Image (cartoon, rainbow, N blue to C red):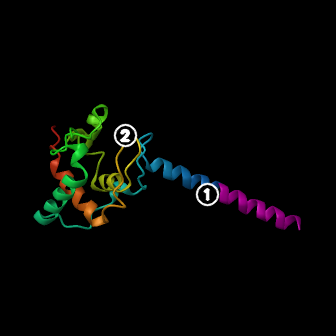
Amino acid sequence: MVRRGRSRLVVAGVAIVLGTLGAAARQEAQPSGTGWQLPPDADETKSPLTVDEKVLAAGKSLYQDKCQRCHGPSGLGDGPDGDPESAADMDLTNPKRTARNSDGIVFYKVWNGRKKPKMPAQKDELTKNQVWAVVAHVQSLRKPATK
């Protein structure tokens, strides 16, 4: 009887440790303090779409409908509904941010959104392929990094 109790205690302890490690791993997957919900493999996630003129046109149309109000027509963060205090964070063209915002990162930011600064989640509004089309358009707005 005592052995069974100890075994259950050990199993419970292992479950708690694994749960804590899992929570820590999920926490590390998100940039600290940003409010973004990003899976650990977000940076390596690739678009299932082949980017061509049709995908870029669809992405631009969706961007104009869902994103332009805040991010502005050219992605500079200067849209009429944008937060002037967060305009630098909302600038999608900044070459310094290119390395930190791979296609997968941008996808999950659009898909999940965040509360502050406000970025509406699109997972209830758009399909995954539509979000990937938006990602393709947004990436086309980027300025090349200067060396």
Q: What element carries label 1?
A: helix
Q: Of the numbered discs in the image, which one, if any, rests on residue 18?
A: 1
Q: Of the numbered discs in the image, which one, if any, rests on residue 1?
A: none
- Indicate whether residue 8 is drawn in magenta: yes
Q: Is residue 34 above or below residue 1?
A: above
Cα distance between the residues tagged 2 and 1: 32 Å
Q: Is mark 2 on a helix, strand or loop?
A: loop
Coordinates of residue 26 in the picture (x, y in percent): 49, 52
Residue shown at 55%/52% (left/top)?
23
Farthest residue to the front: give it: 80
Q: Quadrant of residue 74?
A: top left
Front in this rendered view, residue 7 or 91: 91
Q: In which quarter of the image is residue 61?
A: bottom left
Front in this rendered view, residue 49 or 18: 49
| Amino acid type at mark 2 | Pro
Coordinates of residue 68 in the picture (x, y in percent): 21, 48
**First along the sequence among labels 2 and 1:** 1
Query: Dividing the image into 4 quarters, which one contains the N terminus?
Result: bottom right
- Marks 2 and 1: which is nearer the front? 2
Count residues near mark 1 (Cα–Cα under 10 Å), then give few for <14, some for 14-19, many for 20+.
Answer: few
- Magenta part of the protein: which range? 1-16
Residue shown at 83%/67% (left/top)?
4
Coordinates of residue 64 in the picture (x, y in percent): 19, 53
Coordinates of residue 24 in the picture (x, y in percent): 54, 49
Q: Quadrant of residue 99?
A: top left
Residue shown at 41%/53% (left/top)?
38
Q: Of the numbered discs in the image, which one, if any, rests on residue 117?
A: 2
Residue shown at 28%/52% (left/top)?
102
Q: Main secondary structure of the magenta part?
A: helix
